[in-house]
Image (tube, grey):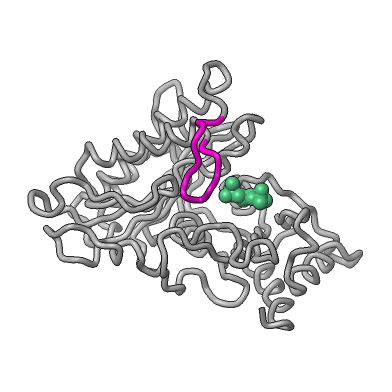
Amino acid sequence: MPKRNQTLGEFIIENQADFAYSSGELSRLINSLRLAAKVVNHEVNKAGLVDIIGGYGETNIQGEDQQKLDVMANETFIQTLTNREIVCGIASEENDDFITIAGCDRDHQNKYVVLIDPLDGSSNIDVNVSVGTIFSIYRRVSPIGTPVTKDDFLQAGNNQVAAGYIIYGTSTMLVYTTGNGVNGFTLNPALGSWYLSHPDMKIPTTGKIYSINEGNYVHFPQGVKDYIKYCQEEKEDRPYTSRYIGSMVSDIHRNMIKGGIFIYPKSSKATNGKLRLLYECNPMAFIVEQAGGKATDGFKRILEIKPEELHQRVPFFCGSTRMVEKAEEFMAQYGD
Ligand code: P6P
């Protein structure tokens, strides 16, 4: 049973047996992510003081303007994971293709691949709103000691061995699962240590918060429009409260604690929605399901979707089970 205020290091050692197949590699992998998170946290928190805020002058494969912190975070996580020689491949929102770690085709026996959104919500950076990092970890499916292949990354979300997010907010938290529940650790920046502040996190089965960008209302499927009106009705348990930060990690973290639903649906402007399956929806879905919640594309479970492309997008309905089920009822009336 997790002990409140245990450090992350103590927690990992105590729960080593929980890491499926792990010969300590997964523990070392989580440890390297927490080191990178501290570096990124330091940069994010001082961004206002140095010339690191603002555009990097280039765009990523998503066609989004890369923010300087995006690039810094991406380089930090990739370098830390590479230096520690724990993984054999990395895929990132900021990189067009996956990265093969040198040596994984001969020297070392590394068996994990990591998929990462190094700084989610980066459009909020310049306005000082919380942003986050999201990571997803799989065992490779190609033979150990050979170069990684795209199939190592295009695995359904229910194959994940671990997933987590870091939220750089009023405090910095690392929230992750290895398939045995969800635990949240808060960074004490003075000591550089992470403390177990949210043991065994469970999302409320229902809630009163809905998170969706209603600016796109006219472009939504009818089922989404009907659900939004349902949330706004004057009834015994409604209207709900609308909260939308524009940083998925922040919106979902709030809903994890208070209960709620986050929806980024498809629309006539974005026929598969905006969020990426591999390094945004799958890890968040794994975490929310492990906390007792639900995550679908409005119809089917996110973790059962077989990926076709590294950067593919999916519609995303995620949060308190009862709320996701109610939204799905409206979606089912129209079938798309
Ligand atoms: P919109 C941030 O860019 C992000 O990927 C998610 O973190 C966030 O939920 C979404 O996009 C916001 O998108 O179109 O509502 O601004």
> Does 317 sit left or right of 19 as displayed?
right
Image quarter where the C terminus lies is bottom right
Question: Quick one: which residue is furthest to the top in this view?
Answer: 49
Q: Is residue 71 magenta?
A: no
Residue 13 drawn above or below residue 213: above
State the residue in front, 106 or 254: 106
Quarter of the figure with residue 55: top right
Q: State the image coordinates of residue 298 (x, y, percent, origin top left).
A: 62, 72
Q: Where residue 53 sits in the image (x, y, percent)?
A: 55, 25
Q: Name the residue furthest right.
A: 234
Name the one closer to the observer, 182 or 158. 158
Residue 319 shows up from this direction:
yes
Q: Is residue 97 above or below residue 64?
A: below
59 drawn magenta: yes
**Is residue 274 depicted above or below 167 in this figure?**
below
Which residue is painted at 34% across and 44% down in the image? 11
Relative horizontal placement of residue 258, taking residue 33 as reference (left or right): right
Count the marks: 0
Q: Position of residue 38 (x, y in %)?
A: 41, 31
Q: Quadrant of residue 331?
A: bottom right
Residue drawn at x 67%, y 60% as measured from the top left: 261
Q: Point out the stretch of residues depicted in magenta.
A: 55-66
Residue 46, position as x, y percentages in the image = 52, 21
Q: Residue at x 22, y 61 (%)?
A: 21
Does residue 175 appear in this view? no
Residue at image location 88% in from the left, 65% down from the top: 233
Snapshot quadrant of residue 169: top right
In terms of depth relative to the viewer, which is nearer, 284 or 90? 90
